[in-house]
Amino acid sequence: MTKQGIIEIARMDGSAAVQAEDAFKRIYAEAFAEPPYNETADDVAAAFRRFSVQARNRTFRAVLARTSEGEPIGMAYGYPLEPDTVWWDELTQPVPDDMRREDGHRTFGLMELAVRGPWRGQGVARRLHKTLVDGIGAERVLLNVHPASKAASAAYRAWGYRKIGEARPRGEDADLHYVMLLDLRLKSRWAPQR
């Protein structure tokens, strides 16, 4: 229990996530308006044009955390990477072919994970992550994180992620991001502490 009440986390498929899009957008807009992201209203609008397309993927999954009063406080979403994913092409240095091999099941792409400021430091992000990836059947999870986001980078490392490279997602004008990989075959390293 937190000062704000009991936190409830719901897992959703794409259609349920689209129905809750306003909650996802609120969390995203608040979390990513902060440095180092400094996203504007235009950036948020672009992210949610992508969200509606991503949510149509039949393997899309999302999680949404709310207080017992229904206030949205955290979210995460993603889906398994298809064989033709461009994710590996965005790396500044190539990785071995075996690492970049995708089959639609091997790697779960964690597109976003965010918690609103007042609820950070209470284990919400860890719970969101665990709920999202629990039972996905993938070998690993791949994500991008801004290197100046020290808290996020530290959390991912504590959960067992390792940096495998750097990328400029969404083009050459984008900020450099760390590309991090979690081997799910080592689950005990990221399982939540009780």
Image: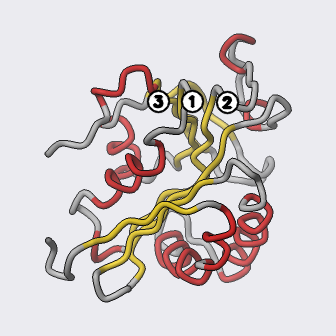
- How crowded pointer 3 is (Cα within 10 Å; few <14, some 14-19, many 20+) is rated as many
Q: Residue at x 19, y 80 (%)?
A: 5
Mark 2, secondary structure of its residue: loop
Q: Residue at x 59, y 83 (%)?
A: 22
- How crowded pointer 1 is (Cα within 10 Å; few <14, some 14-19, many 20+) is rated as some
The spot of residue 94 in percent (x, y) is 73, 20
Asked if the residues shown at circle 1 and circle 2 are in contact, with their CB atoms under 8 angstroms apart, the answer is: yes
The amino acid sitting under disc 3 is: Leu
- How crowded pointer 2 is (Cα within 10 Å; few <14, some 14-19, many 20+) is rated as some
Mark 1, secondary structure of its residue: loop
The spot of residue 70 in percent (x, y) is 37, 86
The spot of residue 27 in percent (x, y) is 49, 75
The numbered mark, 1 or 2, whose residue comes first in the sequence reads 2
Q: Is residue 53 left or right of residue 184?
A: right
Residue with the mark numbered 1: 138
Residue with the mark numbered 3: 182
Asked if the residues shown at circle 3 and circle 2 are in contact, with their CB atoms under 8 angstroms apart, the answer is: no
Residue with the mark numbered 2: 105
The amino acid sitting under disc 1 is: Ala
The numbered mark, 1 or 3, whose residue comes first in the sequence reads 1
The mark lying in front, picked from 3 and 2, is 2
Give the CA distance from mark 3 to mark 2: 15 Å
Asked if the residues shown at circle 1 and circle 3 are in contact, with their CB atoms under 8 angstroms apart, the answer is: no
Where 184 sits versus 96, above or below?
Answer: below
- Assign the N terminus to one quadrant of the image: bottom left
Q: Quadrant of residue 95?
A: top right
Where 67 sits versus 56, above or below?
Answer: below
Q: Residue at x 75, y 12 (%)?
A: 97
Where 110 sits versus 137, above or below?
Answer: below
